[in-house]
């Protein structure tokens, strides 16, 4: 055999090996065709509409170049709209999202933000039927909502176990990005148990599945065609997909959905503690090998934690045997415990591990009467629990009015504004706060969507924060 023939033979073998390798790789890549065929009928498109009041400035009609100079002098190019002086009209606002049927009786799951404030909710099925849906209930903290339609022979999706998901596992999404019905995208699980700002109750599934506006509320599937999550959020700087998508684990969503179907609302466990992360320096100071757990910085003296024997300086390491790897894990672990239920906490105290069993309270903003189980006022709109300011405390602080903030919902309006447990709430919307009950009345009278000034007293000084109330 000549040298040229041997060379050609080697090249032929090499090409054959490469083709075989490519064929093997192709066989290992997942095929989603069967999954889509089976699951698509259970995925729905959701459209909502609501009427909103729009008001026009009394200077409507002036372009920026036509604004009289006297008004420019005071206001620049952005003119104010004095109350009562503008012309108003109603305008219909529409939005799109996705969802899926999880019960043959007509129950549909989606995101709470998809149906927030909707006057009408229409569900379009895969067979092009359009049905009007009733909102059974919605939970803003987990962004889960349950709808109900009246229909028969509805296709349902199988639910999986999101606790068994592993990083690197293939997943697929079906939804309506930008209104394109039943679009399919696929990717892998990038991370699990992600905590996002203001979403402390959800251990998100992070994926690289392409999710865009309109995908919200749609299902995330594993390769067995089971729903393992609800697509909820994306990280973006442009408004479009950038490789970071987040889904609510189906186990979390179903716990919420069951409560919404049964009661129309969700209750959560509450300890009444202020926590902070354990840094490496703090871990060393407490004699720990690694930073872990949630450090109790302060307690509500009348709360469940204090009554159960917890103390400031304790580090909560486990809840019912589940590790508290980060302080952000604690709210969701406690929140999953039914109010009134027993919880076993492993804490580090004085360098020694101890186990404390205590009864969990109810997070106050879920109480029907607007009060916690210890009688403290709980203005749910702000996400705070407050206590009366005793006369002795008033004299010590040099104040003649105000209430003490005993607890703050990490996902609430007050927390977003920077309010902390221990703050003294002195006034809201320029109205003096005299008592917890009076504060609740003031809050109830504030208009939705408004931004109000709140005066606080902390560390010997007063300052203001702005709170934006929920609404349009």
Image (spheres, helix red, strand yellow):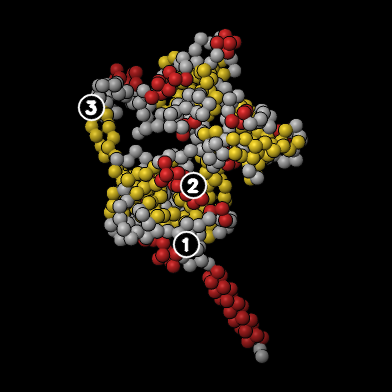
What residue is shown at x 61% (from left), y 83% (from top)?
8
Compare marks 3 and 2 and give the one earlier in the sequence: 3
- Nearest the viewer among 23 and 169 is 169
- Mark 3 touches mark 2? (CB < 8 Å): no
Q: Which of pointers 3 and 2 indicates the residue nearer the eye? A: 2
User: Which residue occupies 29% across, 43% down?
Assistant: 120
Crowding near the residue tagged with mark 1, few <14, some 14–19, many ≥20 C-alpha atoms within 10 Å: many
Residue 309: give x, y in percent of width and height: 66, 30
Task: Tell which of 254 and 51 is nearer to you.
Answer: 254
Res. 391 image quadrant: top right
Task: Indicate the position of residue 156 as horizontal and vertical percent values.
Answer: 40, 59
Residue 423 position, x and y percent, is 55, 21
Distance (Cα) linking label 2 and label 1 = 21 Å
Please name the residue that numbered disc 2 is placed on. Answer: 255
Most extreme residue toward the bottom, as rendered? 1
Residue appearing at x 45%, y 26% in the figure:
379
First in sequence: mark 2 or mark 1? 1
Q: Which residue is mark 3?
A: 87
The residue pinned by badge 1 equals 225
Q: Is residue 206 above or below residue 63?
A: below
Q: Is residue 420 left or right of residue 39?
A: right
Q: Secondary structure at mark 1?
A: loop
């Amino acid at each position: 055999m000549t040298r040229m023939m041997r060379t050609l033979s080697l090249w032929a073998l090499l090409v054959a090996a490469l083709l075989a390798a490519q064929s093997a790789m192709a066989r290992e890549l997942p095929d989603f065709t069967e999954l889509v065929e089976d699951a698509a009928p259970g995925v729905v498109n959701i459209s909502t509409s609501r009427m909103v009041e729009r008001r026009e400035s009394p200077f409507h009609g002036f372009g920026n170049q036509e604004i009289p100079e006297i008004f420019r002098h005071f206001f620049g190019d952005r003119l104010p709209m004095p109350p009562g002086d503008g012309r108003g009209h109603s305008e219909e606002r529409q939005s799109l999202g996705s969802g899926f049927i999880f019960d043959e009786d007509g129950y549909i799951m989606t995101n709470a933000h998809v149906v927030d404030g909707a006057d009408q909710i229409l569900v379009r099925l895969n067979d092009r039927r359009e049905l009007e849906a009733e909102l059974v209930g919605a939970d803003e903290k987990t962004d889960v909502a349950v709808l109900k339609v009246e229909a028969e022979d509805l296709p349902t999706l199988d639910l999986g176990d999101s606790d068994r998901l592993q990083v690197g596992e293939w997943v697929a999404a079906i939804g309506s990005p930008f209104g394109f019905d039943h679009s399919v995208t696929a990717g892998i699980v990038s991370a699990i148990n992600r905590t996002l700002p203001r979403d402390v109750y959800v251990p998100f599934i992070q994926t690289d599945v392409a999710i865009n506006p309109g995908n919200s509320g749609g299902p995330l599937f594993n390769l067995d065609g089971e729903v393992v999550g609800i697509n909820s959020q994306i990280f973006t700087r442009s408004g479009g997909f950038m490789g970071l998508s987040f889904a609510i684990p189906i186990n979390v969503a179903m716990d919420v959905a069951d409560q919404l179907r049964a009661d129309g609302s969700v209750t959560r466990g509450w300890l009444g503690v202020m926590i902070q992360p354990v840094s490496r320096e703090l871990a060393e100071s407490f004699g720990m090998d690694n930073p872990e757990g949630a450090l109790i910085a302060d307690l509500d003296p009348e709360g469940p934690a204090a009554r159960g024997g917890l103390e400031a300086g304790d580090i909560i390491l486990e809840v019912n045997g589940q590790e508290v790897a980060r302080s952000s894990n604690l709210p969701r672990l406690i929140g999953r415990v039914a109010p009134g239920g027993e919880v076993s906490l492993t804490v580090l105290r004085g360098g020694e591990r101890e186990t404390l069993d205590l009864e969990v309270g109810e997070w106050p903003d879920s109480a029907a009467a607007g009060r916690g189980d210890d009688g403290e006022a709980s203005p749910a709109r702000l996400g705070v629990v407050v206590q009366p300011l005793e006369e002795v405390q008033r004299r010590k602080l040099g104040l003649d009015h105000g209430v003490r903030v005993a607890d703050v919902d990490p996902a609430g309006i007050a927390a977003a504004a920077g309010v902390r447990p221990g703050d003294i709430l002195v006034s809201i919307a320029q109205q003096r706060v005299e008592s917890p009950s009076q504060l609740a009345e003031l809050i109830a009278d504030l208009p939705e969507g408004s931004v109000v000034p709140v005066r606080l007293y902390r560390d010997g000084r007063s300052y203001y924060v702005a709170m934006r109330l929920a609404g349009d």
